[in-house]
Each structure stands twice: as structure tokens, then as C-alpha cells.
Amino acid sequence: MLAKITSGAVSGLNAVLIDVEVDVATQGLPSFTIVGLPDKAVEESKERVRSAIKNSGADFPISRITVNLAPADLPKIGPAYDLPIALGILIASGQIAPNISDALFFGELSLDGALRHTNGILPMTGLGKEKKFKRVFVPKINEGEASVISGVDIYPIDSLLSLVRFLSGTIEILPAPKINLWRLLTKTIAEFDFSEVVGQEQAKRALEIAAAGGHNIFLRGTPGSGKTMLARALPGILPTLTEDEALEVTKIYSITGNLPEGESIITKRPFRSPHHTTSRIGLIGGGGNPMPGEISLAHRGVLFLDEFPEFPRNVMEALRQPLEDGRVSISRAKGSVTYPAQFLLVSACNPCPCGYFGDTKRLCTCLPGMISRYQKRISGPILDRIDIHVDVPSVETQKLVDDNSEGREKSAEIQKRVQKAREIQLKRFTKRGIKSNSEMSTRDVKNFCEIDESSRTIMISAAATMNLTARSYFKVIKIARTIADLAGEQNISTIHIAEALQYRPKLES
């Protein structure tokens, strides 16, 4: 007898329908075969399914069982097919006869038949809505994650036995209540408040601009000047995630298994801070079955790379395309996937190996050649892709002694300005599908960033004296647009251009 159950597979950030076809033959020697490009986890589901069926009080057929996961040319990864395979065996062996043509099934089984937490439930639930299925059956532990998707009934199942009883009409399971996504979204709580940072007014201003426009920023300064503290305070001034952004981020965390247990969605902007020993695959993503890396986990949030020159050269250079395109494409023999990577990069470094080159208090012990080699570890193309460059000098002792945090502006006050600027940008780019000024293309810059004649004269002069590349030229205008948004001004003026130019380094000719 043949049974067909509908399930799904995650490909990149999206899901595709998978038909789980189960045939229980009355002739032939007993066997259990799974075909359709299954990986090791899918192959091992044979033992999980066998034990789960027996421990749920049902009979495991002593027959020739063939399971086909179609389409057969798409690799099948992970244990999410346990539940549909087990259900298919029970139907094909004649033990139950439910009407499930309008339903999707996902879930990993324990040996006792209980359903375990399964990765990728959010994109799979979204698939159910997209393909107009009426019911989606998921593990009860994934209930909150699936319930943020409206337009489809979510049935949380705690075990195979409960599912069989429900489909047989013995017990009743109510659909999970829908979750109001907007009420969950909250402002990111940072490790430090901006009022706790002594001095560094220019760096604070630069970080405010970076947060308002989504611009990448490079902090260079002596040890102990506050670079790390500033970076870790940045999430506190970032705008609240929009609903679309929250769903984007949660999809990534769902397929990688990084969504915190009991959480239905990522409610705050991510902050990722990988160590400088991180591999290229760890940062960019990849592997035999390509998975997202740190840059994708930082999507719509902050990626902080401390001690930037200490990262391996090939790891740094791999950031070029994601910084430019806001996404990363990973190609392997089994196929290609594209993951979003629209993050705000905060990189920090010392000016030299000892860290005190240019410091007014301590003497630098590095030779000129050592300083040059250290600074050249970061290539020109990478530096050119970073919008804002700021020097973070050491703080004067007197300022530390006279510390008065009550008189300094708090993160909450700065965040209000940043939020207002982002709202202006969201309204501006409604028809373009982008979220911030940093995402503008060259055409967008020409359409939305018109500058007057005096500003154009300043830009021409600056391009010559500072050796600005074409990319740097447009980045300055984007930053000026953000500065104008923070000021609530519709047009870019010479004041905005002049401030934006302060954040660009002069390139050597």
C-alpha cells in the first residue's frame, strides 16, 4: 500500500515542498530503505522511526518498506522528516486512514515517540502559508516560533501517539493562538550606555550617524581608549526591528538552531562579536551543507570585529562582496545558496603592534617598518568599503577623575533621534525595498541625494585632495544624507558634506 505525506526542506532561507512517499510491500524480504538524496541524519531516521512507532503502541510492519523523498535531485538534510515518515508507514500499513491532503508535517522523533525541537520550523511554516495549506503540524516545543505566521492553523504536537489519536478523532488538539509580532519587538539592551563612556564625543557622534544610516564604521585608537566599550554600547541606540526585519533574522536563527528555546522570534537586533581566530567558513558561512556564518547571523544587526588586523587575510578579504552587496552566495558541489548579510560592521584596531603610535602619554616602541606592515594588514579595498573612519584617542586622566555620568547624554535619548532618522529613510525608500541610506545604489544616490552647486564644488575639491575613489565619493554623499536626516532637513547642505568628509581617510596616491 502507498501513502503520501507532504513535508518541506530548507534551501537557503526558503523552504520547498517535499513529498514523502511510503510504500509498504507485502512481498519481498523485510527491509527499510530511504531514497531521494538523504544525508546521514535522514538515513538514521530509520532507527528513530522504528523505535518511536513501537513505543507509541503501534505495530511496525515486518515488510519491505521504501521511502522516497521527492524531488529526488534535491539533497535532504536533517531529522525533520521523522514525523512524516512515521505517519506514512502507519497509513501505508493500514493502521490509520486520515484525510491529510491539506496538511504539512515536520518534526524529529525521540525513541519513545516524543517530538523534539526541530530547526527550520519558521521558513517551513511560511511555506505552508505560501502554498495555501490549511494545517501545519509541528513539535509543541516549536509552537511559538510557528505561531508568528498568520493565515494557517498551527497544531502543536507533543508525540507521535498524540498525532495518531488526533487524526483518528480520539482526542482534540486546538490550533495554537496567533502571536502579535509587533508587541514582541523591543529595543536592544546594550552592555553599556553611552552616558558611561567618558569623553570620545567625536566617536559617539560617528556611531550615532552609523546607527542612523546603517553605515560601517572603523575605530582606531590606543589600548584602553574605549573602542570596545563604544562598540558594545552601539546596540543601545539602534532602532527597533521592523516586523519584516524580525522575520528575516528569525529565519536565519531558526535554520541554524540558534533561536533561544522558548522564544518565538528574534525581538532585538543581533550583536555578533567573533574572535579573530574565526575561520573563513565560520565568518562567511559554508561547509559541506552550506550554512550561514557570523555575517548572516548579524543580519540587520551589528558585526563587531575587534583586533581587525589580527584576522587572517583571506577571512578579511572574504568580506568584500558581502559588504558591497548585502548578501553572500555560497557554491558547493551539492548546490548554491544565498544568505542575507546586511549588517552594520564595527571594526576596531590599534594604530601599531604595541598600540601607542601617536599617543601623547606613552612612547611607541615599534619600528617604522613594523608599523607600516601592521597597518597594511588591512587592504585598501576593505578600508574603502568602510564608510566612517574615526580615531579614538586616549582619555585624559582629569576627565576620568571629574567623571559626571549624569551630565552626559544617555543612549535612550540618542536612540530617539536615530529612530526618527530611520523612519524618514523607510518612508523615502518605500518603493525601493531598502531600509537605510547605506543600502542605496549609485542610481538611488542620484535620485535621493541631490546636492547644490557649492556642495558639488566642495566634493570635487575633496575628491582631488583626498584621492577619493568613486566608491568613496558616493559613500560621502550617503553619510551626508544621513546627517541631514538626523537634523530633520530635507536637503543636503555644505555643512552636512563637510562633516561627512571628516570621516573619510585620505588615501595615499
Image (spheres, rainbow, N blue to C red):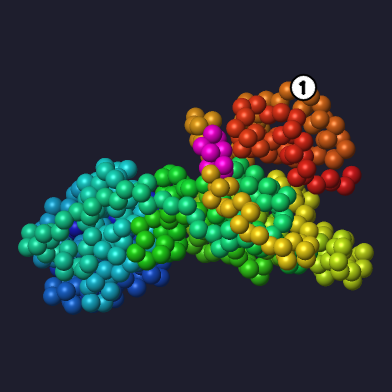
Give the farthest residue toward the left.
170
Residue 471, picture quadrant: top right
Left or right: residue 142 versus residue 396 is left
Residue found at x 12% / y 56%: 98
* Type of secondary structure dominating the magenta stretch: helix
Query: Which of these two is toward me, 361 or 408?
Result: 408
Residue 305 forms part of the magenta stretch:
no
Residue 483: where, in percent of width, then height?
66, 37
Residue 408: where, in percent of width, then height?
64, 53
Query: Which of these two is toward me, 140 or 205?
Result: 205
Part of the protein shown in magenta: 417-425
Query: Which of these two is toward me, 458 or 330?
Result: 458
Query: Which of these two is toward me, 192 or 141?
Result: 192
Q: Name the residue under label 1.
A: 453
Residue found at x 78% / y 26%: 456
Give the farthest residue toward the right.
368
The disc labelled 1 sits on which kind of residue? Glu
Residue found at x 63% / y 59%: 405
Residue found at x 29% / y 65%: 141
Q: Vertical placement of 354 versus 471: above or below?
A: below
Q: In which quarter of the image is the C terminus?
A: top right
Q: Quadrant of the N terminus?
A: bottom left
